[in-house]
């Protein structure tokens, strides 16, 4: 008879532990390999001799004007579209000539009638002058014929002037430009009845180009005193143009509270087209020795005063600084920082003292698109 051996209840927990030990041995947590130095954005501290203001604007023509008929009527034809280049004297639109021709015919008929009346009155006066010399008529009768002749001559002059006006108005039925220009907007269509002076087309003379910008109230004096204007095109940032202030509005716009200014472009290339978006950099001389200017995120305060993070030999060093002023374009540092030191300008609060980092120089704002 074969005997079977069963482990006692006291041995079962121990056997279970021995079985599970190899399993848990394979789940031991391993330390992650050390990562490389963190990359930080830095900027060399430097004394800013110039303050730069950036404005967005639009390329406009210096001479822009609306064309309108000098007489009212119905537009019979519009001969150009927006964007067309026009020559001097080229017909751009025409009115229905029927009414204008009728007015000219009526004026010609009135002129013919006035000429006939004047000829009759003049002959009557000459006849009465001969009778007066022979004492066949009284002086008062001659004066009557003389006054009638003078009135007929005045009516003839009036009819002649009216005929010239009607002739000119007949020529006003054709709209044209006196100088080479580009059609920038169409304000009326064929079949529309327009009044005298109502704009029909908007034209611009492209030979002189400039940038239209809006200047805040606090920057007007800076703009007026500046001597250096740099213009860049949004469509082609490689093109850099020089400009000069040509016009500054004497009063602010009632809605935007900004002053309209025009920057004239000096020798613009043919690539500069009307309506393009442009940026204008205005450089105003600052005060040397006024301190180092840093971006606002570079200065932090963790409860012990203002500090900046400086990268020295690939490690982070905290440097207490004295803030001179908070300005629109950054923080002015009075002391605690030397020119040329690499200052962390982004994420400085998340760095630790002595942490190894890899500095990366930030792109200057003047070169950013």
Image (cartoon, rainbow, N blue to C red):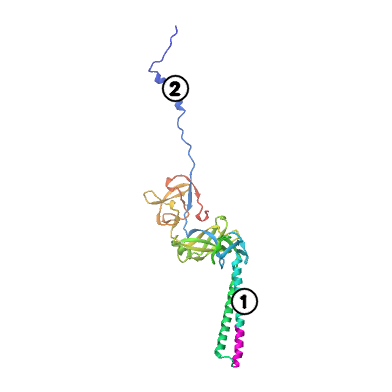
Return the x and y of residue 11 as percentages of the image width and height: 39, 18
Return the x and y of residue 365 as percentages of the image width and height: 50, 54
Say which residue appears at 58% left-offset and 74% top-offset. 162
Q: Is residue 34 left or right of residue 80?
A: left
Q: Which residues are magenta?
A: 121-134
Q: In this rendering, is residue 290 above or below 169?
A: above
Quadrant in the rendering for residue 178: bottom right
Q: Reading the chain from its start, which is encountered first: label 1 or label 2?
A: 2
Task: Please name whichever residue, 112 or 9, is drawn nearer the observer in this view of the structure.
Answer: 112
Say which residue appears at 44% left-offset and 24% top-offset. 20
| Main secondary structure type of the part rendered in magenta | helix
Quadrant in the rendering for residue 151: bottom right
Task: Please name whichever residue, 254 or 128, is drawn nearer the observer in this view of the structure.
Answer: 128
Numbered disc 2: secondary structure: helix
In this rendering, does residue 159 appear at all? Answer: yes
Residue at image mark 2: 19
């Amino acid at each position: 008879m074969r005997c079977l051996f069963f482990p006692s209840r006291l041995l079962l927990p121990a056997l279970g532990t021995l079985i599970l030990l190899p399993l848990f041995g394979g789940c031991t947590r391993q330390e992650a390999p050390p990562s490389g130095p963190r990359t930080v954005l830095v900027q060399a501290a430097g004394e800013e001799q110039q303050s730069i203001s950036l404005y967005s604007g639009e390329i406009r023509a210096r001479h822009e004007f609306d064309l309108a008929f000098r007489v009212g009527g119905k537009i019979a034809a519009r001969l150009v579209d927006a964007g067309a280049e026009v020559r001097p004297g080229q017909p751009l639109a025409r009115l229905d000539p029927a009414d204008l021709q009728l007015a000219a015919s009526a004026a010609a008929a009135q002129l013919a009638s006035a000429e006939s009346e004047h000829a009759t009155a003049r002959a009557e006066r000459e006849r009465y002058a001969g009778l007066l010399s022979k004492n066949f008529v009284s002086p008062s009768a001659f004066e009557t014929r003389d006054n009638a002749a003078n009135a007929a001559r005045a009516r003839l002059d009036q009819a002649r002037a009216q005929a010239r006006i009607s002739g000119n108005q007949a020529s006003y039925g054709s709209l044209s430009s006196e100088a080479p220009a580009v059609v920038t907007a169409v304000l009326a269509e064929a079949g529309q009845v327009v009044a005298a002076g109502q704009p029909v087309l908007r034209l611009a003379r492209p030979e002189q180009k400039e940038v239209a910008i809006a200047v805040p109230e606090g920057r007007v004096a800076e703009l007026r005193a500046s001597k250096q204007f740099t213009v860049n095109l949004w469509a082609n940032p490689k093109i850099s143009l020089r400009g000069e202030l040509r016009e500054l509005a004497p009063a602010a716009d009632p809605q935007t509270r900004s002053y309209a200014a025009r920057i004239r472009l000096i020798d613009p290339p043919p690539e500069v087209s009307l309506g393009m978006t442009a940026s204008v950099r205005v450089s105003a001389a600052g005060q040397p020795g006024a301190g180092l200017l840093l971006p606002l995120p570079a200065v932090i305060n963790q409860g012990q005063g203002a500090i900046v993070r400086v990268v020295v030999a690939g490690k982070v060093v905290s440097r207490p600084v004295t803030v001179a002023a908070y300005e629109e374009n950054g923080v002015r540092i009075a002391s605690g920082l030397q020119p040329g030191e690499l200052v962390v300008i982004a994420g400085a609060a998340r760095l630790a003292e002595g942490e190894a980092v890899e500095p990366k120089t930030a792109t200057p704002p003047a070169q950013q698109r």
